[in-house]
Amino acid sequence: MRDKQLEGRREKREQLQEQEQLHLMEEQVHEFAAEAERTNKGIAREAPVTATRTYDYAYYKQVFADRRMPFAYLDLNLLDQNIRQVVARADDKRVRLASKSLRSVAVIRRILESNPCFQGIMCYTTREAVYLASQGFDDLLVGYPAWNEQDIAAVARATETGAHITLMVDCVEHVEQIEAVASQHGVRLPLCLEMDMSLDLPGLHFGVWRSPIRTAEQARPAIERIKASSHTWLDGLMGYEAQIAGVGDNFPGNRIKNTIVQRLKRRSIREVADRRAALIKLVESYGLPLRFINGGGTGSIVTTGAEAGVTEITVGSAFYAPALFDNYRDFRYQPAAGFAIEIVRQPQPTIYTCLGGGYIASGSVGPEKQPQPYLPRGARLEALEGAGEVQTPIRYRGDISLRPGDPVFIRHSKAGELCERFTHLLLVMDGAIQEEVTTYRGDGQCFI
């Protein structure tokens, strides 16, 4: 009895220690974010410069003269630079577009047509995949599991008309749910098996909570269930190393944090490669051919591409290059997408209050999820008010004379979420608006 009591106390003490460690980590994360905000006050990203032009405030103000605000835009010259950089970094690997970071049929089509290495789309819901299939796109991989029978049935109906939509699974229950719907429609549906790629350390889960499959052996039941199914088949494998692809490691003024993250990334890179190779070997032992092996994201193009078993890399944020992706050591993309809000009042000589602008990014709450003033250079948010639902005060002490009616150009923290706020994107090239295209919202679509 005494041994059981001691064991119970020991387990409780370990649980409390683990909770304290997690709480400390959370506090450190928020401290790092707050410090980054303090460090970056008054510091704006340099405007891109090419041999023929400088993409500064005067340039964009002239391009959008007399255009009613707010509006969102995409600079095609800078987008093309980002496309070329993605192609170079992918180094002959196929690149699948992450539609959640683009959310415009016209832009997705433009990128797919720009280079043969771009093949296929990773969608974020089945409804989106069915919609894109209706727009003529093929090779659609749904990046997250679907459970609703109506959603799976919509994929089955699209499959009957010739679409190739691959559904994500990570457990036997997913397979059985999809098989039940597919059998009702008399079709076979392709599946992608996802393995978790996060790194677990004492007191720290470095990554995101996705698949419960963390080892090749844990994948065996799902593989065997798929193999036994008459209405599904294993089309591919996926593992998303979010802690490498989606975590910045070069925040100004945060040397200690940057060093820790860089070391964690290096350790993750080795473990991810070993874990993925073991899963591929297991699938091969069952004699199941795979059409693709997907991995990575914008922040891990090179490291994911270095794995021999990976056939394609998913990339999305690199094309628009939102503010969160300024803080990576190994690459820098051009700020191709943004939006403009209008100055409507001036309560102080150095404060210009704009209409709207509070387009906050999803994820854990922190100052880095606010939209970031981009141009004029040196503009910044007011720390105590931030970007507001109906007004956003901008502090600016620079040399450019600003007045009511002038624009302030802002960059969203994330990529595709910008398009949830606007129905159209103004496409700019060579100093002029070339075209106005719809976003998903402009198409009357809202998938999630």
Image (cartoon, helix red, strand yellow):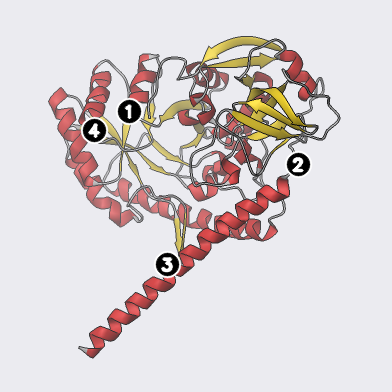
Q: Picture quarter containing residue 425?
A: top right
* Disc 2 and disc 1 in contact, CB within 8 angstroms: no
Q: Earlier in the sequence, mark 4 or mark 2?
A: 2
Distance in Å between CA atoms under marks 4 and 2: 47 Å
Distance in Å between CA atoms under marks 2 and 3: 37 Å
Residue nearest the viewer, comparing 236 with 262: 262
Disc number placed over residue 43 in the picture, else none: 2
Q: Picture quarter containing residue 383?
A: top right
The residue indicated by pointer 3 is 19
Q: Earlier in the sequence, mark 4 or mark 3?
A: 3
The amino acid type of the residue labelled 2 equals Ile
Q: Residues within 10 Å of mark 1 (few under 14, many from 20)?
A: many
Residue occupying the point 72% across, 54% down: 253
- Residue depth check, mark 4 versus mark 3: number of the one nearer the observer: 3
The residue indicated by pointer 4 is 148
Vertical arrangement, residue 28 with respect to residue 41, above or below:
below
The residue indicated by pointer 1 is 126
In the image, residue 331 lies at what x, y percent? 66, 41
- Residue 382 shown left or right of residue 313 in the figure: right
Q: Earlier in the sequence, mark 1 or mark 4?
A: 1
- Residue 183 shown left or right of residue 102 in the figure: left
The amino acid type of the residue labelled 1 equals Thr
* Disc 1 and disc 3 in contact, CB within 8 angstroms: no
- Residue depth check, mark 1 versus mark 3: number of the one nearer the observer: 3
Distance in Å between CA atoms under marks 1 and 4: 10 Å
Vertical arrangement, residue 2 with respect to residue 30, above or below:
below
- Residue depth check, mark 4 versus mark 2: number of the one nearer the observer: 2
Q: Quadrant of the C terminus?
A: top left
Distance in Å between CA atoms under marks 1 and 3: 37 Å
